[in-house]
Amino acid sequence: MPDIRRALGALGEAEACRFLERGGARIVERGARTRYGEIDIVCRDARGYLFVEVKTRRAGSFVSAVEAVDARKLARLAALAQAWLALHGKRDARWRIALVAVTMGRQGLAMELIELDRLD
């Protein structure tokens, strides 16, 4: 089962990258590692850096993608974003956090970009 989940997650991330690029973002890094953890996707658009958490679900899943990102997870994402910016000498850059919710159903993939508030 873990291999299926990993494959589903990898597919979701690849599709999320294409979705973000179609929306005008440039992918800077995938699977960006900091000493505190990993960021799924780091990209840039006209408004600055965008740190993206990707949640892939099958249609009808018990927990929606949005419900999987609570205040604690959002705070962790903000800390990861700040660590990444510091590591790359971009502490003063404009940035924000978003979720790409990928839903796999019989009709194919549905994707939604949900911008989340920074906690700072």
Image (cartoon, rainbow, N blue to C red):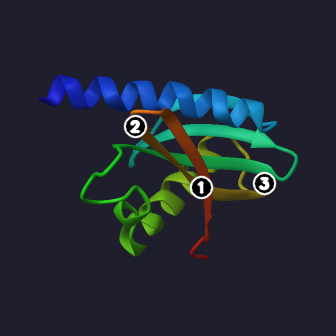
Label 2 Cα crowd, 10 Å radius (few <14 / some 14-19 / many 20+) = few
| Amino acid carrying mark 1 in the image | Ala
Report, in whole angstroms, how far the alpha carbon at label 1 lies from the one at label 3.
16 Å
Decide which of tag 3 and tag 2 comes sooner along the chain.
Answer: 3
Q: Which of marks 1 and 2 is in front?
A: 2
What residue sits 42% from the left and 62% below the top? 76
What residue sits 52% from the left and 25% below the top? 14
- Pinpoint residue 119: horizontal percent, then vertical percent: 57, 75
Decide which of tag 1 and tag 3 comes sooner along the chain.
Answer: 3
Q: In this view, does 27 lie above or below 85?
A: above
Which residue position is annotated with label 1? 98
| Amino acid carrying mark 3 in the image | Ala
Which residue position is annotated with label 2? 105
Report, in whole angstroms, how far the alpha carbon at label 3 lies from the one at label 2.
37 Å
Decide which of tag 1 and tag 2 comes sooner along the chain.
Answer: 1
Which residue position is annotated with label 3? 93
State the residue lying farthest toward the right: 46
Label 1 Cα crowd, 10 Å radius (few <14 / some 14-19 / many 20+) = some
On screen, residue 48 versus residue 77, left or right, reads right
Disc 1, SS: strand
